[in-house]
Amino acid sequence: MKHHHCGYGLNYLPSQDSSATRNGFTLVELLMAAAITSLVVSIAGFGVGAATQANKRTNAIAARRHDLSRAFDFISNEIRMANRINQSQMMQATDASSMSSLLTSVGLDASDWSNPVLYLEIPVTSPIPDVCPAGGPNAGAPPPQPATFDQVIYDVRPSPQDWLAPNSIHRYGRVPKGDGSIDPCSNPVASDTLVDAIAEQINTSPTCSAPGVLMGKGGFQACVNGSQVDLFMRSKISDVEIHRLNSTATSRVVTGQPIPVLTATQQSGTNHVNLSWQWSGSMDGVTFEVKKEVTTTAQKSQIYSGSSMSNSTEMKGSTGDQHCYTVIAKVGQISSPESNKVCFTQ
């Protein structure tokens, strides 16, 4: 008898372990990764934007400082070339009102200025033709008057549209050529904006000691004392920063103002003195004043005023007194320097 054994074939399959066989990410993980990436990109973008804005601000501040420095140098250079500063042959500006009167008296229109700070008369060094040449301004006509000098006004006023607030410095006058010379046939340009972003308010007003006269307001002021100008400029760099420039500019030619030359003789055996003088300046509206000083008593007095070029006088006082005479020329409010001194003993 054969015995048959029945076997059961059991197939054993490996278990399905999810952690060992998964190849992707869950939705939650993808969302978290996206959020983190977005945050990092946003932070990086903010940093780049902030750096860009800071760089633009730095460049803007540097540009404003550069513009102010260029304007400052340009005005200072024109002061050095001027033979009259805040005065004409007949008048001198001592305040805003007299400045307006001065500008009107020299034939300028009130629309050409707002708050004038400086008025300059700059000699024209180029040859002045009888008739302006063809191909240039005013061709075939005489040069615009005045032909021998340029009239320049610097004033401060609210900035026009498209210029930086609050104020701007404007210039009236002929525009110099590239070499700095002035074409006598050219016409003056009115209301030409020189530089903007001039401050409205400043913390401390400039010091201007007598006999200097302070003109202007806010960020553009000038202390004028004869041929010397202390120039003050303040630019509003930002809401919290004011850029300051100040320096002194002195005219190189204003000291060339004509001076009377006095001569005198004493009649022999008398105390009678004959005085006469020469004057190289214009005779239009000029008067002369003769002053006497008795040096032994320190007494000074005016003995003559008029348009004549000579005068006679008697020395009066004690024997041995020394009488010294000088003369000045006056045109309106403007006085020349004092002449040489001539002395006689009584």
Image (cartoon, grey):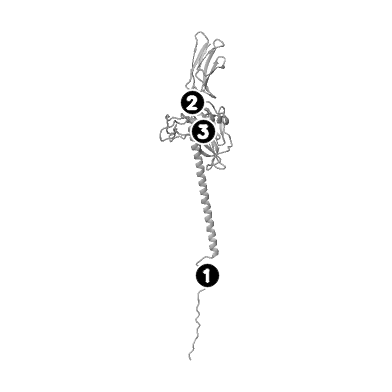
Query: Which residue sits at x=52%, y=55%?
Result: 41
Q: Which is closer to the viewer, label 3 or label 1? A: 3
Inspect the image, locate mark 3, and give the three-letter code of the amino acid beneath it.
Ile
Where disc 3 sits, the SS reads strand
Looking at marks 2 and 3 on the same chain, the residue that comes earlier in the sequence is marked by 3
User: Residue pushed farthest front?
Assistant: 140
The one nearer the camera, 8 or 27, is 27
Q: Position of residue 5 (x, y in %)?
A: 49, 86
Disc number placed over residue 255 in the picture, else none: 2
Q: What residue is shown with label 1?
A: 18
* Label 2 vs label 3, nearer the camera: 3
Near mark 3 (Cα within 10 A), the count class, few <14, some 14-19 or many ≥20, is many
Q: Quadrant of residue 179?
A: top left
Indicate the position of residue 12 as horizontal and vertical percent values: 50, 77
Which of the two marks, 2 or 1, is nearer to us in this view? Answer: 2
Disc 1 is placed on an element classified as helix
Chain-order first, disc 3 or disc 1: 1
Return the residue at label 3.
153
Q: Amino acid at mark 2?
A: Thr
Q: Position of residue 147 (x, y in %)?
A: 46, 29
Q: Measure the alpha-carbon separation of dots 3 and 1.
A: 90 Å
- In the image, what residue type sits under mark 1? Ser
How packed mark 1 is, by other alpha carbons closer than 10 Å (few <14, some 14-19, many 20 or more), is few
* Whether label 2 touches label 3, CB < 8 Å: no
From the viewer's perspective, is residue 166 above or below residue 261?
below
Asked whether the residues under the numbered discs 3 and 1 touch, taking CB atoms below 8 Å apart as contact, a structural biologist would say no
